[in-house]
Image: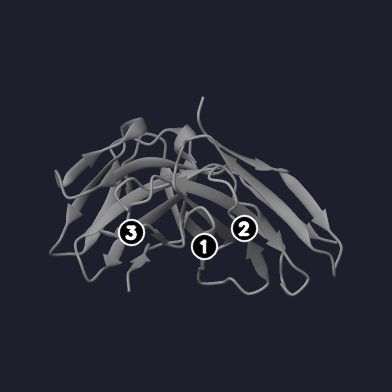
Amino acid sequence: AQSVTQLGSHVSVSEGALVLLRCNYSSSVPPYLFWYVQYPNQGLQLLLKYTSAATLVKGINGFEAEFKKSETSFHLTKPSAHMSDAAEYFCAVSDQGYSTLTFGKGTMLLVSP
Amino acid sequence: DGGITQSPKYLFRKEGQNVTLSCEQNLNHDAMYWYRQDPGQGLRLIYYSQIVNDFQKGDIAEGYSVSREKKESFPLTVTSAQKNPTAFYLCASSPGTGLYGYTFGSGTRLTVV
């Protein structure tokens, strides 16, 4: 069975600082990996995805993530935080061939001026 | 524009009543899903359907029911058997494989009064 662990339920950064949100997964087969963002009282929006192509994946709003098989990680980064990045971020995994996604518990990103 | 529409956005239910949450998509996606979101618990899968007239239980199906009579529609009924129904409910769809991830609706917040 697949699972996702997001380290830190809350992460606080200053505007302009590096954003690093951690995600580790377990999967019995090479996975598909996703990062989603959720603003208050809204649905989830896809930021980026890894599907066995390049290990460094670039997404929307300046975010990127690197797939590291040896570490079973897919951490999300952004060089410089903006106030508008404050939201909840979810990492998700899907085994190849299966359609359901398993989500982590989410990390709330707080950005201070 | 294609997307997923959930209605209503806010719903109040008296204890002992059944309520139905609507989810409609015009993306021509084969698969549809219902997730429940509670603070600090991430997203938990209730039911999913990969084809019309077929659906499978997710991790927390007790107290819920669904139907999939049309490709575009996947309504969720929260029955009186669900002991703690107050939550944010998210509907999603996908082309059917894990490769693409999901497209989400904007959610329905259900409150038991």
Residue in the picture at 32% in, 57% down = A22
The residue that mark 3 highlights is: A93
> Could you say which is closer to the camera, residue B105 or residue A20?
B105
Left/right placement of residue A66 relative to residue B7 reads left
Residues under numbered marks 2 and 1 in contact, where contact means CB atoms less than 8 Å apart: yes
- Residue B94 position in % (x across, y down): 42, 46
Same chain for labels 3 and 1? Say yes or no: no
Chain for numbered disc 3? A
User: Where A105 sits versus B94, above or below?
Assistant: below
The residue that mark 1 highlights is: B55
* Res A79 visible: yes
Chain for numbered disc 1? B
The residue that mark 2 highlights is: B67
- Residue B76 position in % (x across, y down): 65, 57
User: Mark 2 or mark 1, which has the lower sequence index?
Assistant: 1
- Residue B80 position in % (x across, y down): 78, 71
Separation of residues labelled 3 and 1 (CA atoms): 21 Å
User: Where A90 sits versus A25, above or below?
Assistant: above
> Could you say which is closer to the camera, residue B94 or residue A59?
B94
Question: Please, what is the three-letter code of the amino acid marked with disc 2?
Answer: Ser
Q: Secondary structure at mark 3?
A: strand
Please identify the quarter of the rendering in which residue A41 is found.
Answer: top right
Separation of residues labelled 2 and 1 (CA atoms): 8 Å
